[in-house]
Structures are given as C-alpha cells and as structure tokens.
Image (cartoon, grey):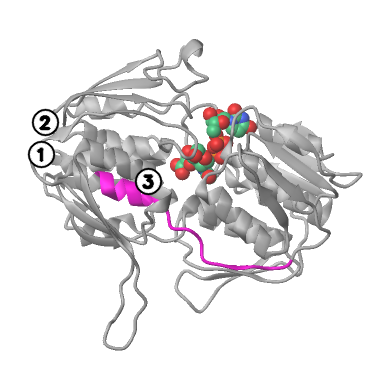
Amino acid sequence: MTDDVLVVHGGTPLEGRIRVRGAKNLVSKAMVAALLGDSPSRLFDVPKIRDVEVVRGLLGLHGVKVTDGDEDGELVFDPANVEGASTDQINVHAGSSRIPILFCGPLLHRLGHAFIPDLGGCHIGPRPIDFHLQALREFGATVDKRPEGLHLSAPNGLHGTKFALPYPSVGATEQVLLTAVMAEGVTELRNAAVEPEIIDLICILQKMGAIIKVHTDRVIEVQGVPKLHGYTHRPIPDRIEAASWAAAALATRGHVEVLGAQQADMMTFLNIFRSVGGEYEVTDARAPKLGDPGQEGGIRFWHPGGELKSVALETDVHPGFMTDWQQPLVVALTQARGLSIVHETVYEQRLGYTEALNSMGANIQVYRDCLGGTPCRFGRRNFKHSAVIAGPSKLHAADLVIPDLRAGFSHLIAALAAEGTSRVYGVDLINRGYEDFEAKLADLGAHAERP
Ligand code: EPU
C-alpha cells in the first residue's frame, strides 16, 4: 500500500492540453466481440489501462492471438484457434474486472460452453448479474452457479428470443447483443440501454456482418446470422475521461483542452458544466491540406473566474447525466455558491466518497430520500443516494484512500484543488480507467509525485 500513493501539492490550476483515446467502456467490449469473428479484427486507439490487460489475458487463454499493430494503440485479434481454457487459468483473472461476464455468448457460440470467473469492478453497490443470466437462459443457455464461478452450456444451441430488461442496463444490453448476433432467429430486446458506447458496439457488430435495428423507445431487434467476420474499428473517445478532466479544470480554476472529446456524446455534461458557470469551446477537427497543418478536434474547458453557481442534477441512463460524471463534478460543486443537489438514480451506493471530501472541508450531506423527480429504484429501499452540497468551501489537504475508480479521480481532483499537501493512497486503481494519468497530470502542470 505504501508504494501505491501519490503526494499531491494542491492549489495550482491545471493548465494545458491532454488527449483521450478510445472509451474504456467500449474498447473492452469490442475486444470481446473479436471472439465472434472467423477472421482477424483490428481495433485502434486502445488505451493502456488495466481492463484492457484483463480482457487481453482472457482472450489469450481462449486461443485468440492478440498482437500490437503498427499504430500506437492498435491491437490485432486473430480468433483462428479459439479453444477452451481451464478454470484455474481463467480464475487468475477473478475479481479483476466486470468484462468477463460478456464472454458468455461469444464462448457459447464458439465452443458450446463457457466458464466465467467471479467478477470484479468498482465497489459501488451490489452490482448483480441477474439480468444477464435471465437473458442467457432465454436464449437457451444452461447456467450452473458454483463457488468457483459460472459454468454455462448451450446443449441445443442459442435461439433468438423476445426479452424486456427490468432496467436499461448497459452490460445486460451488451450481453444480449453479443449473444443475439449469432443466435438462430430474431431477438427483440425491449428497454435496452442506448448509450453511445452501445451504439458503437452495434456499429462494430454490423461491420462484422450482423443485422441489428435500433428502433425508437429503447427497442433493439437482431436478426441472427450463422457467421461473422473480423472488423476494423476506431472507437468513440472516452467521454467519462474527458468529463473528468473538465471537472478537474473547473475545480482547480484552470484551463484544460481535451483533444478527442466529442460534443455529441457529452451534450448533457456540457449543459451542466455551463449552468455551473464553467466555460468551454468545441474545436472541430480539420483535415490537413496544403499550407494548413489541420487540427485535431476536442473541447477546451475553463474556469472563467469569479464564483461558480449551484445546480440540481440527477444521474440517469443515456441521454441523461452519466453516473460516472457525477463524482468528479461534485468536487467542482463544492466551490459553487449555494446548495447543489445530486440525485444518483443508477447506482444505490455511489456517494460514499463524499465523506473524504467532507474531511477536506467540504459540506456535503447525503440523504435516503429521492431529491429529484426522476423515477428511481432506491428511494424506498433506504439507500443514501441523494446529496446536498453547500458551497463554496475552502478545501484543505488530507490523507485519502481511494475506494473505486471514479471516486478515486474525484479524490485526486480534490487534492489538486485543496491548499497544502495531500497523500492519496490506492492511486493504482485509477489506472483501471485513466491511461497515463500521472503523465497527464504532469503535462497540466500539477505538482504530484510518488514518494
Ligand atoms: N443491474 C442489475 N442487474 C443486472 C445488471 C445491472 O440490477 O444484471 C443494475 C445495476 O446494479 C445498476 C444498474 O442496473 O444499478 C445499471 O448497471 P449497468 O448494467 O448499466 O452497468 P454496467 O454495465 O455494470 C457500465 C459501465 C459503468 C457505468 C454503467 C452505467 C462498463 C464496464 N461499466 O456498467 O462504468 O457506470 O455502465 O453507465 O461498461 C466505470 O467506468 O467506472 C463504470 C462503473
């Protein structure tokens, strides 16, 4: 634990330019999709983060040859020799990521059986997989839960089905897509998640030969095909990372240009950012031509000076305000005048990190009530899932222990915004989702070092 600490000297505005690459929450799924092809796939802009390492390891265990391509961040997947792996080998990856659950459909199609280790990921609530398992059973899979993990088989193959999700879960929608594309017949999924990362996964599957229709009102229809081939794809940029740096710029009264950030996928965030008093400018990409070196697109975010304004926001599924944008932005909200309100409707326990902010001088109260009008599954179940942030508060340095990925980044922002020297323990967790974050901090002029 002592090595895994960052010493942060706060109080300096972040200033400069960084670049985000392919979205963590798409890239890992795109890697799983490569298992379905009968020829190699090529994925660009893959960030060097832990989730990618885990999926790479699991693909390797199942016979997919993964190599680095010519371009920095390019991975090539060759699924010519897909094979089973032993439970012991697979269990090496137990508890390291939630992505392994998405191997079910592709492995059932390729091998007729699958073993899925115990899942990991962030500790932000119980994070059940009941929707996934229910959907897989609807397709005809047999699921055997054992202490070491899940054993699945499909003795009679997988068949298209009509299925409605109880909640538009991102992972369960991906599970259905990755299974339905090669299941026999038609699948109709209702109440599907339609996040940009899901639409990008659909684009990949379509490139591979799948037939997928996205109807209005969260209905997705998939016509199963017997065979898919490899894809070549440049993923959408990471809109969670982009928003995290934007929030860091605002909280430290700085100015950060995020190359790669895309306006269309961040509209809801941009509206809130502007309501709080932050400013931004979208710079569109321009191709190079004679006498013009061209320009990489992105978004510049900055604090215009003066005071920030309080806001009320509710997290929600797309096109709502992402739950993963919430924690970084709340740090900036501690600097806004008045009472800001956050109603977290996606995860029941995603406000625990506010205690650390309070230990630094913030004034945040959490409530069991739904402080907002969005229908929510948690109000009657006694979860502290709403927060009231009174500001502005002067943040001072503290020793912090990172509990999960996004909360971890919010701790980091708080340490950067606070006066004095903080020690942030458990920073390696941030590598799960933020590529090279220490180098990026240095590029932005932050004073942070490993002791
Ligand atoms: N849920 C169930 N049963 C299920 C599946 C989900 O009750 O079988 C519930 C969850 O407990 C949660 C809600 O449905 O309350 C939404 O969960 P969802 O399935 O949408 O989340 P996920 O697929 O596990 C992905 C991202 C998360 C992101 C959420 C919401 C990945 C690897 N993870 O998780 O990202 O917060 O969608 O957008 O794609 C992160 O990047 O830090 C992160 C946690």
Q: Is residue 234 magenta?
A: yes
- Residue at mark 1: 419
Horizontal placement of 172 versus 340: left or right?
right
Task: Work out which residue is located at the far front of the displayed protein and give it.
Answer: 216
Numbered disc in front, either 3 or 1? 3
Across and down, in percent, residue 238 comes to 42, 54
The residue at which mark 2 appears reads as 394
For the record, the magenta segment spans 229-247
Which quadrant of the render holds ligand 1?
top right
Asked if the magenta segment contains residue 428, the reply would be no
Q: CB at mark 3 closer than 8 A to ligand 1? A: no
Position of 66 relative to 329 (above/below): below
* Residue for badge 3: 267
Is residue 118 visible from the viewing direction of this image? no
CB contact under 8 Å: marks 1 and 2: yes
Work out how far the residue at label 1 is from the one at label 2, CA to CA, in angstroms.
Answer: 8 Å
Dividing the picture into quadrants, the one containing residue 340 is top left
Please tell me whether mark 1 or mark 2 is closer to you in this view: 2
Quick one: SS at disc 3?
helix
Disc with the residue nearer the chain's start (1 vs 2): 2
Q: Residue at x 40, y 36 (%)?
A: 321
Q: Residues within 10 Å of mark 2 (few under 14, many from 20)?
A: some
> Which quadrant would residue 225 be assigned to in this image?
bottom right
> Which amino acid is tagged 1?
Glu
For the residue pair 97 and 127, the one nearer the viewer reads as 127
